[in-house]
Image (spheres, rainbow, N blue to C red):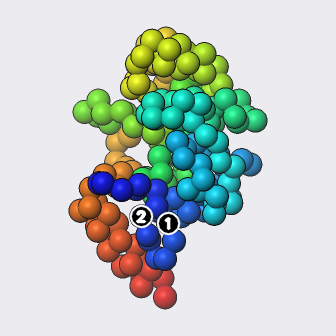
């Protein structure tokens, strides 16, 4: 999009602030992993610098897991502003027996940036990064992964383009008017 999506304005606040605010009532700890943590000092969350900046989302997840005080961690991208916490709780329950619980559509599309990761996946992630691999899915073959069926999840949409952003702003404005 040519800019930091986390800082896109939504109702007068950065997008990431909305995401963090949605998470806070549901989790004991919220960590934001970032290449440039100074950009997020305004957040009421723990900010963790990526262990090696510029290495992509796998490094962000590994850095967040390494810093977390908890064995089981829900990971969400800053550009996924809506969540179904019933779905998230289902993934958290399944994580008892797996290193990762990752949503998967019927067409086989994975959503690794809206998933649950245990600290047990961290050594595999670090080894994958050490091999020069950057895709999150590159770590999956060495992990115990449960695929969570993502059948009808209209709520799960990333903001990847200006059009996605404009659509989200319109929907947010419309739902806000409906709540008055």
Circle 2 SS class: loop
Crowd tier of the residue under label 2, counting other residues whose Cα lies within 10 Å: few below 14, some 14–19, many 20 or above: some
Q: Quadrant of the N terminus?
A: bottom left
Q: Which mark is residue 127?
A: none
Q: Give me the residue at 58% from left, 42% from top.
A: 33
Mark 1 in CB contact with mark 2 (< 8 angstroms):
yes
Question: Please, which residue is most extreme toward the bottom here?
Answer: 180
Q: Residue at x 62, y 36 (%)?
A: 64
Image x and y of residue 104, in percent:
37, 33
Question: SS of the residue at dot 1?
Answer: strand
Query: 10 Å neighbourhood of mark 1: few (<14), some, or many (≥20)?
Result: some
Q: Residue at x 48, y 51 (%)?
A: 78
In terms of depth relative to the viewer, which is nearer, 108 or 169? 169
Task: Please state if 33 lies on the left or on the right of 111 as rendered.
Answer: right
State the image coordinates of residue 179 (x, y, percent, origin top left). 48, 82
Compute the Cα span from label 1 to label 2.
Answer: 5 Å
Which residue bears the numbered disc 1? 14
Identify the residue at image location x=42%, y=85%.
177
Identify the mark at residue 8; answer none if there is no mark: 2
* Image position, residue 20 (x, y; %): 59, 57
């Amino acid at each position: 999009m040519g800019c930091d999506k986390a800082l896109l304005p939504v109702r007068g606040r950065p997008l990431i602030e909305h995401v963090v605010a949605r998470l806070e009532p549901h989790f004991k700890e919220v960590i934001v992993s970032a290449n440039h943590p100074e950009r997020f000092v305004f957040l009421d969350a723990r900010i963790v610098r990526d262990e090696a900046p510029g290495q992509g989302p796998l490094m962000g997840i590994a850095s967040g897991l390494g810093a977390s005080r908890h064995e089981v961690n829900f990971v969400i991208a800053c550009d996924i502003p809506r969540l179904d916490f019933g779905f998230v709780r289902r993934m958290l329950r399944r994580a008892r027996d797996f290193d990762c619980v990752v949503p998967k559509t019927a067409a086989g599309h994975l959503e690794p940036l809206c998933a649950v990761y245990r600290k047990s996946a961290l050594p595999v992630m670090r080894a994958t990064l050490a091999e020069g691999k950057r895709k999150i899915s590159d770590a999956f073959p060495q992990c115990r992964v449960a695929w969570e069926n993502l059948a009808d999840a209209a709520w799960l949409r990333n903001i990847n383009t200006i059009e996605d952003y404009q659509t989200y702003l319109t929907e947010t404005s419309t739902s806000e008017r409906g709540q008055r």
